[in-house]
Amino acid sequence: MSTSGSVKIGILGAGTWGVTLARLLYRKGYSVTVWSAIPEEVAYLSETRVHKNLKEMRIPDGIVFTVDMERACTGTDAVVFAVPSVFMRSTAEKAAAYLAEDQTVVSVAKGFEKDTLFTMSGILEDVLGNPSRIAALSGPTHAEEVAIDLPTVIVSASADRKCAAFVQELFSTDVLRVYTNSDILGVELSGALKNIMALAAGISEGLGYGDNTKAALITRGLAEITILGKAMGCHRRTFSGLAGIGDLVVTATSRHSRNNRAGYLMGQGMTAEEATKAVGMVVEGLNALEGAVKLAGKYGVEMPIVSAVDAIVNGGADPRAMVMKLMTREKKSEFDFNT
């Protein structure tokens, strides 16, 4: 695999991250085609060259938008899956007919599949096979900032080191620095669970709580992610890296975070459905909740913050009551120094 010469990239999904990455890759000199299942979206982006949620970014004229899956996939050096987690399997199944066995496949989505509990790369492997050509790109990366060329750092993760390095080379620019990581499960686990912790941070802010509370939620949230990750065989250092604490901090604190915003609105009294409608974009933390709760049960791991958010979102629990429940849990040590 090489990024020299004429590189062709297909991007499946025309949301903020998919279109932002399309611009970044096009500016490297690559040929970029973006697929969307929505004809109206393709027409709007093709005509206006502006994404409705990225008003500061102009889409280069050379980027092609299409509803033709074959056109986006066939003959490309890599295909990037940038669809919401709930559409990952159906999109992969449609794309499978047009993908060669050696084409690199990159997931930039975050979440779990409810029934299988697969991460996004797990779905891609299940549908497409050959995990050695699958990578996940994840980290503290709000599209709104990458779209205007603010310096950003991300992780290319794959079980195959050559694949991770290829994706690193593919996406590296003077505004996007890419590190590699062979712990793809840990990277994706972090990406899915940090959205739930961002919901918790937003809820606390919506309730009127301060920075002390948010810092505690971020820190103990990371502890929950790490404990589950270790139980699932992931490497502890992944969670102290960019895809772990890095992504958690930016998602739990940034004004760009749709999960944080949705949580804030729920803390103000909205239901999850009302908050999602107000945010106007997919809130992946809500989609990840069921999978996170099931994984905690499967691996016998206690995740009190995840459980509290689930009780609020899916059980109708009062947010203040759940905070009190967290604060009055059985007294414990922060660390078990024997492990």
Image (cartoon, rainbow, N blue to C red):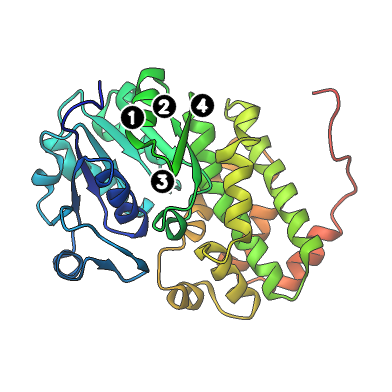
Amino acid at dot 4: Asp
Tell me which label, 2 or 3, sits earlier in the chain: 3
Q: CA distance from mark 1 to mark 2?
A: 6 Å
Q: Which mark is residue 134?
A: 1
Are the two marked residues, 3 and 1, in contact with CB atoms closer than 8 angstroms? no
Q: Position of residue 7 (x, y in %)?
A: 19, 33
Label 3 crowding class (10 Å Cα cut-off): few <14, some 14-19, many 20+? Answer: few
Q: Is residue 272 left or right of residue 302?
A: left
Residue 130 shows up from this direction: yes
Are the two marked residues, 1 and 2, in contact with CB atoms closer than 8 angstroms? yes
Amino acid at dot 1: Ile
Give the residue drawn at x 27%, y 49%: 22
**Residue in the foreground of this view, choosing between 327 and 76:** 76
Q: CA distance from mark 2 to mark 3?
A: 23 Å
Tell me which label, 2 or 4, sits earlier in the chain: 2
What residue did someone put label 3 on? Answer: 115
Which is in the foreground here, disc 3 or disc 4?
4
Give the residue drawn at x 32%, y 33%: 170
What residue did someone put label 4 on? Answer: 183
What residue did someone put label 2 on? Answer: 158
**Residue in the foreground of this view, choosing between 255 and 99:** 255
Amino acid at dot 3: Asp
